[in-house]
Image: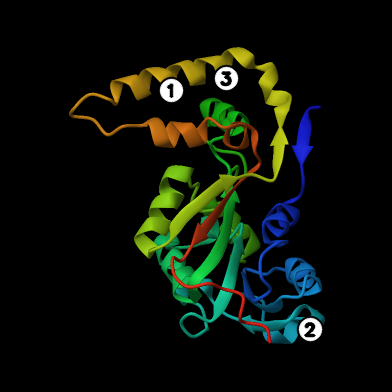
């Protein structure tokens, strides 16, 4: 089998299926497809994105609020049990500021699910070696912005290293790093995978010197099949605190 997994929405929904029902915010909601699925699960849904309210047609998906995500979220502190932000952070002018806003509106004990293109995959590494750009970051941002005139430019390619740091600085704890769809066709280039693992082993060993920072933890995550072959990097993070699930009466 050359591919395995589910679409991005299903990967996140699978993590929420056994969680208590609560208030969910979909940041960068697009057409509202994810919110409709969450509502069918019994969650109370809210959405925000750059689309004007007059153009929002799917009122059955939940409450929609137009906003510029670069300037903050239009919600009070600790308003939601769950916050979902899929394929948004790579578009933002300030990724760390976005993470702080996501944490601000998340209740104590709440969960955040955030995703971005997985630039650590074998496919993306090879592409960068060949033409200096990662998968999903093919076009120069200036030309992309001038052509489209919409806030959909992929500006920041973000590794697990940076994303977990942004979340840490925002006050959130990373609970899991996973993907939605694995493409194993790149395993055909097994010498490259072997070389990456061998190099990681060498660097991990060197990092155990007294003057170095140990690399066991980060290599333990980025050498999983999810990160080597996954399409998107998905992080589940938590706002440490009280139990959640009281948002829906």
Distance from label 3 to label 2 (Cα)? 47 Å
Residue at the spot of label 3: 193
Residue at the spot of label 1: 200
Q: Is 75 situated above or below 14?
A: below
For this orientation, the residue located farthest to the front is: 243
Q: Residue at x 42, y 63 (%)?
A: 94
> Callout 3: few (<14), some (14-19), or many (20+) C-alpha neighbours within 10 Å?
some
Q: Is 196 situated above or below 116?
A: above
The residue closer to the viewer here, 168 or 87, is 168
Question: Residue 117, percent across and down?
Answer: 59, 47
Horizontal relation, residue 159 to residue 60: left or right: left
Residue at the spot of label 2: 59
Distance from label 2 to label 1 (Cα)? 49 Å
Q: Earlier in the sequence, mark 1 or mark 3?
A: 3
Residue 209 visible in image: yes
Observer-side mark, 2 or 1, equals 1
């Amino acid at each position: 089998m050359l591919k395995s997994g589910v679409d991005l929405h299903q990967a996140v929904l699978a993590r929420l299926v056994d969680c208590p029902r609560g208030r969910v915010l979909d940041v960068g909601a697009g057409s509202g497809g994810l919110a409709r699925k969450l509502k069918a699960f019994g969650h109370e849904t809210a959405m925000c994105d750059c689309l004007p309210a007059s153009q929002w047609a799917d009122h059955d998906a939940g409450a929609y609020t137009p906003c510029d995500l670069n300037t903050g979220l239009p919600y009070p502190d600790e308003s939601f049990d769950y916050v979902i932000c899929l394929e948004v952070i790579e578009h933002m002018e300030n990724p760390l500021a976005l993470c702080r806003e996501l944490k601000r509106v998340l209740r104590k004990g709440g969960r955040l699910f955030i995703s971005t293109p997985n630039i650590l995959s074998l496919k993306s590494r090879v592409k960068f070696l060949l033409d200096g750009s990662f998968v999903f970051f093919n076009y120069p941002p200036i030309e992309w912005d001038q052509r489209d005139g919409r806030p959909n430019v992929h500006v920041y390619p973000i590794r697990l290293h940076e994303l977990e740091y942004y979340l840490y600085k925002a006050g959130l704890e990373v609970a899991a790093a996973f993907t939605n769809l694995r493409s194993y066709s790149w395993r055909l280039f097994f010498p490259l995978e072997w070389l990456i693992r061998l190099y990681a082993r060498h660097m991990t060993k060197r990092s155990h010197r007294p003057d170095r920072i140990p690399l066991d933890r980060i290599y333990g995550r980025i050498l999983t099949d999810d990160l080597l072959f996954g399409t998107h990097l998905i992080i589940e993070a938590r706002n440490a605190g009280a139990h959640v699930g009281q948002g829906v009466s």
